[in-house]
Amino acid sequence: MSPIKSPQRYPELADPQVRPRFTGVPTFFRLPYSEDLAGLDIGVIGVPFDGGVTNRPGARHGPREVRNQSSLMRIINAATGIAPFAGRRVADLGDCWIEQPYTLEAALAEIAAFFRTVKAAGVTTLAVGGDHSISLPILRAVAANGPLGMVHIDAHCDTGDDYLGSRFHHGAPFRRAVEENLLDPKRVIQIGIRGTVNDPNMWRFSRESGMRVMPMDEFQDLGWRAALSEAERVIGDGPTYLSFDIDALDPAYAPGTGTPEAGGLTTIEAMRLLRGLTGHDFVGADLVEVSPPFDHAGLTALHGASILFELLCLLAAAPAR
Ligand code: MN
Ligand code: MN
């Protein structure tokens, strides 16, 4: 099939990813949109579901706005030199859309089934939420061969328990994941934790299960380099998941999110931390909690898309499986 318009002067423009960035349909990173898993290494997947929020909704609109802002990304990470599209076959696999959004546990089961199908084809997944409840069903698929380590960057530990009668919501996915033997808590580090609580033991499960919790005050005192060293010590060489809640960033950078907390990471601190993790055995990642209805000037979606590019680079640079 020949295109209607082919480049006449600049043959490199045959590649949509290097055309002027205001052109084209905004898939993630202007990648080809494809639901064909054959021959693919990494699939970027939207999960437009926010049925697990405890406060402000809207993260169901996250994938579309992150796609839009991700069209600003070019193809090479200038800081690390990683060109994630050159070494690995990457596609926008579209959305994991939900048939039963009013039934939380059924919706989570749909998400797990979708990611199991992708994993069964040997494709590494990079998910864009959606609220943080989606990480549990993703881990049910990705951790099928045994518990994983995790680098978790968030204002909240998300290891709470039942809330208003539900065991499943965006404040509890990682407690459930440990209970389901999807995570090895001794190989989990949680960075950026802060904010107010109603119960001083709200995140007790993290500490009692052996997770390394790095509150925001400690991060600020020690800096991103020390946080990086600590993360590398905790996750070691084993297979590791990476979950990035955009509310880890200060609301100055990411106002459009469900549960903002003042006093967070700057975007460059998060980027330096992520870049430092290059080469570790990351087997999947997600970016969650971008809520466009609460955003201003696309700030949160832009920073989210920029973090997503760093996550993609980590997956592309992980040891081949
Ligand atoms: Mn959070
Ligand atoms: Mn979270």
Image (cartoon, rainbow, N blue to C red):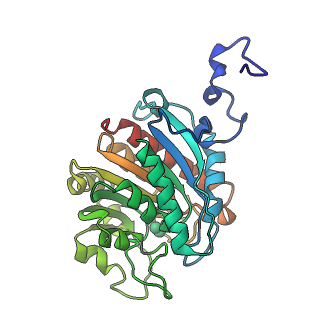
Left or right: residue 28 compared with residue 152 = right
Left or right: residue 309 compared with residue 297 = left
Q: Horizontal and vertical percent for residue 320?
A: 32, 35
What's the residue at 45%, 75% (across, down)? 171
Viewer-side residue, 295 vs 235: 235
Viewer-side residue, 9 vs 43: 43
Q: Horizontal and vertical percent for residue 312?
A: 45, 42
What's the residue at 58%, 39% (across, down)? 29
| Residue 249 in sight in this render | no
Q: Quadrant of residue 196?
A: bottom left
What's the residue at 65%, 28% (across, down)? 16
Q: Outermost residue, right direction?
A: 4
Q: Horizontal and vertical percent for residue 258?
A: 57, 70
Left or right: residue 17 compared with residue 307 = right
Q: Quadrant of residue 193?
A: bottom left
Q: Quadrant of residue 218?
A: bottom left
What's the residue at 58%, 75% (across, down)? 103
